[in-house]
Amino acid sequence: MKKRVIVTLTTSIIVVLAIGTMLIVSAQSSYRTMEKKATNLALQQGLVNGVTNAYVYNGSLAYITVLGIDEENERKAVFVPASFKKKAIQEVWLADGISKSEAIMQLQEQAKVKSVLHTKLGYEEPGAVWEITYIDNKDDLNYMYYEQKNGEEWKHITVTKENDDL
């Protein structure tokens, strides 16, 4: 009887882990497919000559941010909408605004930051924005958005522990 319980539990754990792994791989695969498609589109359209990074940014609208260099070796960000409509593609030259490290330094001067979770360049209503996700000294989750062109704060969202039961 004891042996049967151990075998059943072990089998159940293995099945749950296998299903979980398959779901995670499947979800990541769709993101990688979108990133690859956006990268190819940016290259084909001549918006960049080389790509250094690409990732999905989910804001008001979903964009795939493609970071690379143009024909003059200038660092550039191309924002490809998830719809892949060529007319809706946006672009900025990174030298024309604040950098990722400048945005993080600005945040650390402005807020009590315990740890920065991630920083992404995305596209929103005012244009290119740095989204910085961080934990503050109260252990609350925060999203700070700075406009890339001038470093102005665009939006700040705090998720407090009282909101955890949502």
Image (tube, rainbow, N blue to C red):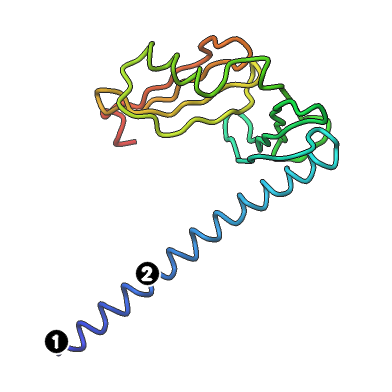
Where is residue 147, by image quadrant? Answer: top right
Q: Residue at x 42, y 21 (%)?
A: 157
Where is residue 71, by image quadrant? Answer: top right
Quarter holding the N terminus?
Answer: bottom left
Give yes or no for contact between labels 2 and 1 (Cβ–Cβ under 8 Å): no
Of residue 44 and residue 30, the one placed in the foreground of this image is: 44
Of residue 165 and residue 20, the one placed in the foreground of this image is: 20
Q: Is residue 123 left or right of residue 7?
A: right
Mark 2 or mark 1: whose residue is earlier in sequence: 1
Of residue 41 and residue 30, the one placed in the foreground of this image is: 41
Task: Give how far across and how far down residue 161 sits, in percent.
Answer: 26, 29
Task: Give how far across and how far down residue 53 sits, in percent.
Answer: 63, 40
Of the numbered discs in the image, which one, if any, rests on residue 2?
1
Q: Residues within 10 Å of mark 2 (few under 14, many from 20)?
A: few
Mark 2 — residue?
16
Task: Give how far across and how far down residue 66 sits, in percent.
Answer: 68, 36
Q: Residue at x 59, y 35 (%)?
A: 57
Identify the residue at the far left of this view. 2
